[in-house]
Image (cartoon, rainbow, N blue to C red):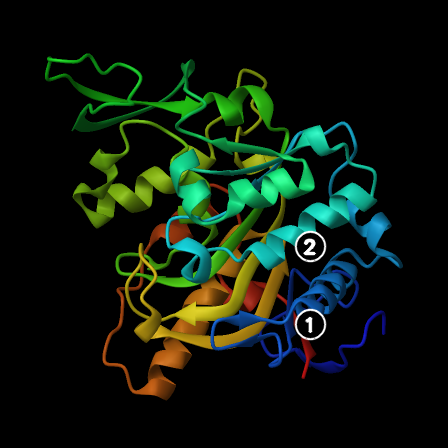
Amino acid sequence: MSSNIPHAYEDNKEGNVSKNKPNIIVVKDISSSKRWKINDTAVSEMMKEGLLQLTQKKDINTAWLSLVDNKDIIGIKVNASPGKIGGTRKEVVDFVIKGLLKAKIPSENIVIWDSSLKELQTAGFVDLANQLNVRIAGSKDAGWDKSVIYDSPIVGTLITGDEEFKSGEEITSRKSHLTRLISQELTRIISIQPLINHNKVGVSGHLVGLTRGSVDNDRRFGISDAILVEAIPNIIALEDKEEKRYIGDKIALCITDALYFQYLGQNKALLHYTEPLGQLYFSKDPVALDMLGIEELEQQRQRLKIEFQPPRSILYKNATWLQIGESDPAKRSIKYFGR
C-alpha cells in the first residue's frame, strides 16, 4: 500500500470490474473532517492514495504526469459559490496545485477558475493562488468567444455581461457563447466539486460545475428541467472545427470533495444541512462520479430521516448518450480505501 490509509474493500457487485483500472476510487478517513475543521495531513494522504490507485502509478509525480504534461495549460475548476465551507475546499485544491508543481508543471500553466473572480475572492481562492504563485480566472471575466456558439430554440433576455448585451436595449437571443478561457487558453481541466444536493438534477456536481459560467445567456436554461438537462451535456459536447470537444475532451481528472456533504439546498452553504463525511472520490468520468454522489446523498437522507427526494433526472442518461461518461451503475467499477 502506497500510503498510511489501509485498504478497506472492493465493490464487485455492479458488473464487470477491471482489477487494473477501476473507474472510481473512493478514499475515506473519518479524521479528515470534523465540524468545519479540515485535517490537512489526512487529506494529503487521501489525495495521494486516490491518485496512485486511479492511475496505477508507483509515485505521485508519475501519477500526475500520466494525467497532464508540462506543456498543458491546466484549469482547476472549483465551485466557489457556496463559500469557504460549503464549496470546494481549499485544502484539496492546495494539494492538487502543490502536486502539479512538484511534477514540474510551470506555475504559470496552472489556473484556478470558476464563474467569477468575485466568488473566487470570497471563497479564498485568490489568496491561495497568490500564495502558490498560480493564476486565477473567472470564466465570465475572461469574456466570450464570438466564434463558439451553443444555439438552441430557447430564447433568453440578455443581461449585463452577455456578449451581445447593449445598455438601454432589451435584446433577446437563442445563442450562448463559450468563455474564451476554455476556447482559447485551457488545454486540460481538473474538476473538483463538493458533494451538494441539487433540487432539479440530484447533485450540484461535475456536469453542473463544468458548465456553470462557461457560456453567457445561460439564465434561459433554468426555465424548465427539460431545457436544463439538454443544455448541460450539449455544452460539454461542443466541438471545434477539428471535432474536439472544448470541455469534454479536456477533462483530465474529476475529484468529488465529499469531506462534507450538504443534503438540502444547492447554491448556498447551509451549514444546518451539512454533515462531515470524510471521503474523496476520484475518476476520469464526471458522469459516474455524479451518479455516485446522488446515491450517497440519497443514503444519507434516509439515514437522517430527511423527507426529500429530488427527481431522477434524465441529465445523466443524456450525458451518456453523448459519450461524456457512464450513468449506468452496472457498468462502473468502484474500489474503496480507508478507515
Q: Earlier in the sequence, mark 2 or mark 1?
A: 1
What residue is drawn where x is 36% and y is 51%? Answer: 315
Left or right of 188 on screen, residue 210: left
Regarding residue 166, the answer to whether it shows in the image is yes
* Dot 2 amino acid type: Phe
Picture quarter with the C terminus: bottom right
Left or right of 156 on screen, residue 116: right
Say which quarter of the image contains residue 107. Answer: top right
Left or right of 114 on screen, residue 168: left
Picture quarter with the N terminus: bottom right
Of all residues shown, which one is farthest toward the right? 58
Residue corresponding to mark 2: 95
> How many numbered discs sit on the rendered protein?
2
Task: Tell me the SS state at disc 1.
Answer: helix
What residue is drawn where x is 58% and y is 26%? Answer: 244
Q: Is residue 136 above or below residue 8?
A: above
Disc 2 vs disc 1: Cβ atoms closer than 8 Å? no
Which of these two is toward me, 45 or 177?
Answer: 45
C-alpha distance separating marks 2 and 1: 11 Å
**Mark 1 residue crowding within 10 angstroms, few (<14) / some (14–19) / many (20+):** some
Which of these two is toward me, 31 or 301?
Answer: 31
Residue corresponding to mark 1: 42
Q: Is residue 144 above or below residue 290?
A: above
Q: Is residue 236 above or below residue 334?
A: above
What residue is drawn where x is 62% and y is 80%? Answer: 31
* Dot 1 amino acid type: Ala
**Mark 2 residue crowding within 10 angstroms, few (<14) / some (14–19) / many (20+):** some
Task: Tell me the SS state at disc 2.
Answer: helix
Name the spot of residue 54 as percent of width and height, x first: 73, 59
Say which quarter of the image contains residue 141. Answer: top left
